[in-house]
Amino acid sequence: MLEVRELSKEFGGVRAVQRVNFVVRDGQIKAMIGPNGAGKTTIFNVITGVVPPSRGLVRFNGQPLTRLKPYAIAALGIGRTFQTVQLFGEMTVLENVMLGRHLRSRAGLLASALRTASMRREEAAIRERSLEILERVSLKDKAGHVASSLPYGEQRLTEIARALAMEPVLLLLDEPAAGLNRAEKARLGGLLRRLRDRGITIFLVDHHMDLVMEISDEVLVLNYGEKIAEGAPGEVQRHAEVVAAYLGAEE
């Protein structure tokens, strides 16, 4: 589904990513891990068009992405969340999720201004679909709450719900378990498995190794912008370079 070849990204003289190669296959939960500054979020930003690559190629279902704008990449079916929660805090949970349907709506500016019958029908359908998504992430009872009033874990779930409202086939999650307690992480893990079972491919970055190793089909490891390992969770855990990157190498 996603193919990254010889990807490099430099910021001035800093090499954030160096000649990284990997694929994400349809139906996978794939994790990308590594110490802080390893280049993980930079790769997410290149994939989603936030920053251009210095060199290399990114393909999604065979289509090159590297010259597309973020909105065009999202329209192809790639949704994402961010390392820090990016919600409209004064809007309700439901309104935040409804915003995620923007790419799938058809009503234009004139129809919206005139509140035409077709526009009202579309708005009702968006509302109904957004409530279904909130039920999927166990937040339907919080639909009318102001987003900023929710506990941090539920704000994370709201952001995931908004990404799901775009109807992505590939979902990129940047630190979805950051700040979550043990129960919330278990809830998140169950949700990600259910999404995978419903046909959504997931590519995630996270520092919580217990969650990563439990739910991932495959793990990619970066260190100082370079790929040092890739494979099944158990295989990666035993990899000497991975152990050294996280725990330090013996002299």
Image (cartoon, grey):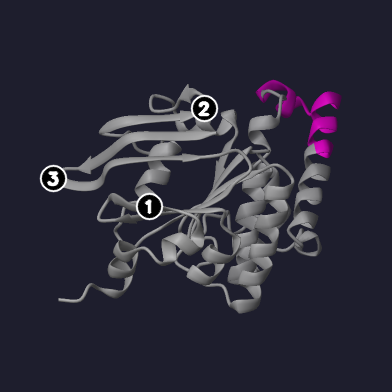
Image point 38% across, 39% down: which residue? 46
Asked which secondary structure carries label 2, the reply is: helix
Q: Badge 2: how crowded within 10 Å, few (<14), some, or many (20+)?
A: some
Q: Is residue 30 left or right of residue 222?
A: right
> Does the image show residue 218?
yes
Residue 235: image quadrant is: bottom left
Image point 29% across, 59% down: which residue? 37
Residue 13's tag is: 3
Tag 3 near tag 2, CB within 8 Å:
no
Q: Which residue is mark 2?
A: 72
Q: Nearer the viewer, residue 93 or 243?
A: 243
Residue 231: x %, y % from top left: 46, 52
Q: Earlier in the sequence, mark 2 or mark 1?
A: 1
Image point 67% across, 52% down: which residue? 161
The amino acid sitting under disc 2 is: Ala
Q: Which residue is mark 1?
A: 40
